[in-house]
């Protein structure tokens, strides 16, 4: 974001070159009126300011509070009803592909192309914030229910990244001294959240260990045995806000590691919050999203089944779960993303812009790892020697 006090310069409209990859894209739709939020004082485009949680002008400093409906709320949506609506639209020949759309920048007049799931970005020619006006309200798309505004400023994210780098034990000393160089990009990622009341019936066996003495003389020793007892039961469990990122091409484990999110601070969807940030709509459909959520629920239920069987060890023969009262929400959650290079490799770091949690890739020092392994082996050898002498 520029801090220059002069109005944004007008960029020259440049022709779009035709690449080989563009041959596979559908013809673009034209939205000549993109969503922008002009400043009441100077007319420049407003962007969302994290510090004041309002729109602000980067040129004259004017602050405009968000125009939120005090009566609006984030409501749970019925999962099966929405699937029926989607199936009906497909039968009518209406899909939910984001496709390609072109909008005209109101600041410089350039034509900007939105490809795929991108819904909010900066103009490549003058830096003005732009949003597609068709995608979030399109009848063929599942609407956004809520958004978590950026709560962690870029400067705070960078300080958290510095601490994260310094805490990496096996990172090269040069990397820790230099730190990560690069620019954070703020982006809203699409998420599904699912609620469900579950009823689970399970069968299995509970194992209890006991020890017997076998052999004689020098061969005399204690051997562990296990007695098995049948176990079964039925229990209910309610799952609330099981999160599934609804965008492909992201490192899933790293994104999941950003949890938990302060979902209680989400607000009803408002386009003004997106001003000045990248944003994407979903490319993992609602039914696919529930498959991922169901897997997370199943993992939690299997863990609970083992706890309920109890004993020293368990055998699980069957777990049958019924999912009732399934509801969902479509949310946009904020992250700071940064790509950097160290040596000849590229790495990526993501920061939860609601909590400041840092996750990412980093280089390793094989010298440090080798020394640590050698020290561990020496310690094990000393311990074995002391034990044998005792």
Image (spheres, rainbow, N blue to C red):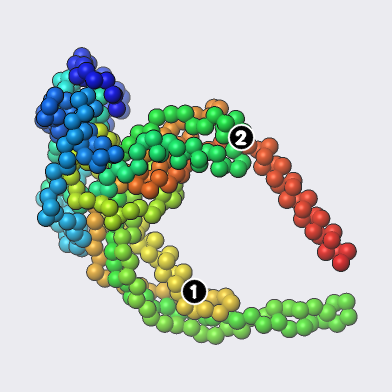
Q: Quadrant of residue 56?
A: top left
- Residue 340 in the image, given as x and y percentages of width and height: 46, 30
- Residue 298 in the image, given as x and y percentages of width and height: 40, 66
Query: For the residues carrying marks 2 and 1, which lies nearer the camera in this image?
Result: 2
Judge whether 290 appears above or below 134 on screen.
below
- Residue 370 in the image, given as x and y percentages of width and height: 70, 41
Residue 114 in view (yes/no)? no
Which residue is denoted by mark 2 in the rendering? 172
Which residue is denoted by mark 1 in the rendering? 306
Q: Earlier in the sequence, mark 2 or mark 1?
A: 2
Which one is in front, 72 or 194? Answer: 72
Judge whether 273 appears above or below 343 on screen.
below
For label 2, the crowd category at 10 Å Cα-Cα, with few meaning under 14, some 14 to 19 and many 20 or more, is some
- Name the quarter where the N terminus is drawn: top left
**Circles 2 and 1: CB distance less than 8 Å?**
no
Residue 147 in view (yes/no)? yes
For label 1, the crowd category at 10 Å Cα-Cα, with few meaning under 14, some 14 to 19 and many 20 or more, is some
- Residue 97 in the image, given as x and y percentages of width and height: 21, 42
Q: Residue at x 86, y 64 (%)?
A: 388
């Amino acid at each position: 974001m520029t801090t220059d006090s002069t109005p944004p310069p007008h960029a020259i409209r440049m022709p779009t070159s035709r690449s080989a990859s563009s041959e596979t894209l559908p013809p673009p739709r034209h939205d000549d009126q993109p969503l922008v939020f002009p400043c009441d004082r100077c007319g420049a485009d407003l962007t969302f300011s994290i510090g004041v949680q309002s729109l602000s002008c980067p040129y004259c400093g004017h602050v405009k509070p968000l125009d939120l409906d005090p009566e609006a709320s984030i409501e749970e949506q019925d999962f099966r009803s929405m699937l029926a609506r989607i199936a009906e639209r497909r039968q009518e020949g209406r899909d939910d592909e984001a496709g390609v759309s072109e909008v005209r920048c109101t600041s410089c007049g350039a034509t900007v192309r939105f490809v795929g799931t991108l819904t909010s970005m900066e103009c490549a020619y003058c830096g003005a914030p732009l949003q597609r006006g068709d995608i979030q309200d399109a009848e063929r798309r599942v609407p956004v229910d809520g958004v978590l505004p950026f709560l962690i400023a870029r400067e705070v994210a960078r300080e958290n990244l510095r601490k994260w780098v310094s805490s990496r034990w096996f990172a090269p000393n040069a990397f820790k001294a230099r730190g990560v160089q690069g620019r954070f990009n703020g982006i809203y990622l699409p998420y599904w959240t699912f609620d469900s009341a579950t009823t689970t019936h399970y069968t299995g066996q509970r194992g209890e260990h006991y020890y017997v003495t076998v052999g004689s003389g020098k061969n005399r020793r204690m051997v562990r045995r296990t007695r098995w007892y049948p176990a079964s039961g039925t229990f209910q469990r309610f799952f609330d806000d099981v999160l599934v990122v609804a965008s492909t091409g992201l490192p899933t484990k790293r994104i999941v590691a950003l949890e938990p999110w302060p979902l209680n601070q989400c607000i009803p969807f408002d386009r003004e919050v997106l001003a000045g940030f990248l944003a994407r709509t979903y490319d993992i459909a609602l039914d696919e999203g529930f498959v991922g959520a169901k897997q997370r629920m199943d993992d939690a239920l299997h863990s609970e089944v083992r706890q309920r069987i109890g004993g020293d060890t368990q055998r699980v023969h069957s777990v049958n779960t019924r999912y009732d009262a399934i509801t969902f929400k479509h949310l946009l959650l904020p992250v700071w993303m940064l790509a950097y290079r160290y040596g000849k490799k590229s790495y990526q770091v993501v920061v939860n812009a609601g909590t400041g949690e840092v996750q990412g890739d980093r280089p390793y020092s094989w010298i440090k790892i080798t020394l640590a392994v050698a020290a561990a082996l020496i310690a094990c050898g000393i311990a074995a020697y002391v034990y044998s002498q005792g």
